[in-house]
Amino acid sequence: MDELRYPIGIQTFSKIIEEGYAYVDKTAYIKPLLSQGQFLFLSRPRRFGKSLMLSTLEAYFEGQRGLFKGLAADSMDLDWTPSPVLRFDFTAENFSLENGLESLLRRLLREYEEQYGMTRVADTVAGRFSQLIRKVTEQTGRKVVILIDEYDKPLLDIEDNKELFEKNQRTLKSFYGNLKAMDRYIRFTFITGVARFSKVSIFSDLNNLKDISMADDYSDICGWSENELVGKFRPGIETLAKKRKEAFEDTLRAMREYYDGYMFTEVGSRLYNPFSVLNALDLKRIDPYWFQTGTPTFLARRVRKLGTFPPDINGKMCTREQLLEVGLNSSNPIPLMFQTGYLTIADYHEEANLYELRFPNREVEIGFYQQLLPIYAPDTTDPFSPFSFTLFKMDLVEGRIQDFMERLATLLKDLPGEDHNESTYRAVTYLLTVLCGTPAIAEHHGYKGRSDIEVKTGKYIYVFEFKYNKSVREAMDQISSRDYAGRYTMDPRKVFLIAANFNEKREERGLEYKVVPLKGA
């Protein structure tokens, strides 16, 4: 019987240990972190264990050695002398409010000032922070430890509000500017976030801040390897397999497809998303959980604005310098997609010194595409709309390809905006097929060429070729001459060839199409 307690939403190390929740031991990283320097920075996607790592460090610096009994850190040669800890957590605040950031900082500072019986002298949050660091050190006789969780949330939350973004940027720059000036009072500083700091102009004064985000030694500091997953959660996976009425290995393979695949250096392990794994094991159902907690819509808008065909996001090549860029002020969304976890390192081409990026897993791909589709076609996410993607899904699953094409033709004809082109129509069609839950392949390579989109359901296979301002006949001739359906000769499913052309040259704009059923259809 599965008796594990899953710490869903629990990011406090002491609570997990004291109340018997399952914990994957990451305490072996404490000693090497202390040897790295005085000021460290780590970038990882949201819901990936950063807050728990900070809480673990907090417990260590407070000298709570009893919590570490039986864990890796307990057997290490560590200095367990307590230090005063100042922790600033930005994870739960709403920064869309005009003074949200200032209000949070003032409240946190006030709580520490009251804890240490301090009389406030400075008026600004930066001045109060500087005073707090110095006074706590003088009062306790010990240097302070500063832990900052999700430092960049005050910026990511309001990225599209230029005025508020710049205001929060100035506030944070002033606040963090104290760290270097007060370094003689600081024992250790650890800062986490999603976006890297190199060009955000927040840490420009803190030039000794060491970024360990792509350091090989810390590639697995957050997230779980498959060995860690199976070693700690085998009973839960076995229970899930029993619920799914399949073998353990089949369930593990499904979890791998949905939740594994994150890689932050060229030599690190493939990592699972802890948040999604815990939810899947607790609810005993493999579903996309991570993206439901909030996908940055501005990333999807940038992809749309650039006119990038969604499948082309996979396979992007970047240099290390590009991956370390901050994408907040850049029209290129790829670096920030990597930092936020929507793309991961799939391969490293050493000779060219290039990283190949791909969606880490199906959960992330679905989540991103769900944000992208309504930017192209808003009506598709309305469950009461005749263009709801659930209706498109039923058309494909039940073999109603004529209904699918008629619905698609009407949708494309009424798309909002004016910047429509072939890539727009291909993107809408591709996103619809992917979000219908059917395996969709864009530009499938065959021995004679590449089809636009191929979709497979349990009973049907659909081969699409789209043209723009050409003709249906030309599209069908291409399908036939290049034998796109030849690979399915031995497949028992029914096969449909769909040739389509979106015509804007004639008086009435519209999608022309022809459906040709092959064997068994």
Image (spheres, rainbow, N blue to C red):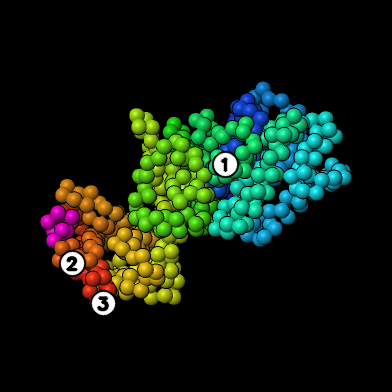
Count of marks overlaid on the render: 3
Camera sees residue 4: no
* Label whose residue precedes the other's in the sequence (3 or 2): 2
Characterize the local packing of mark 3: few (<14), some (14-19) or many (20 or more) Cα atoms within 10 angstroms: few
* Label whose residue precedes the other's in the sequence (1 or 3): 1
The residue that appears at 18% across and 67% down in the rendered structure is 472
Q: Taking 337 as reference, is 387 above or below it?
A: below
Q: Which residues are magenta?
A: 477-484
The image quadrant where one finds the C terminus is bottom left
Q: Taking 140 as reference, is 498 above or below it?
A: below
Residue identified by numbered label 1: 197
Q: Secondary structure at mark 3?
A: loop
Q: Nearer the viewer, residue 393 or 494?
A: 393
Q: Secondary structure at mark 2?
A: loop
Asked if the residues shown at circle 1 and circle 3 are in contact, with their CB atoms under 8 angstroms apart, the answer is: no
* Label whose residue precedes the other's in the sequence (1 or 2): 1
Q: Amino acid at mark 2?
A: Ser
Residue 230 lies, in percent from the top left, at 48, 39
Q: Amino acid at mark 3?
A: Glu
Residue 342 lies, in percent from the top left, at 46, 49
Residue 393 lies, in percent from the top left, at 35, 66
Q: Secondary structure at mark 1?
A: loop
The residue that appears at 23% across and 71% down in the rendered structure is 505
The residue that appears at 45% across and 51% down in the rendered structure is 331
Q: In the rendering, which numbered label is found on residue 358?
A: none
Q: Nearer the viewer, residue 265 or 38?
A: 38
Q: Nearer the viewer, residue 250 or 366?
A: 366
Q: Nearer the viewer, residue 404 or 233?
A: 404
Residue identified by numbered label 2: 471
Q: Amino acid at mark 1?
A: Phe
Residue identified by numbered label 3: 508
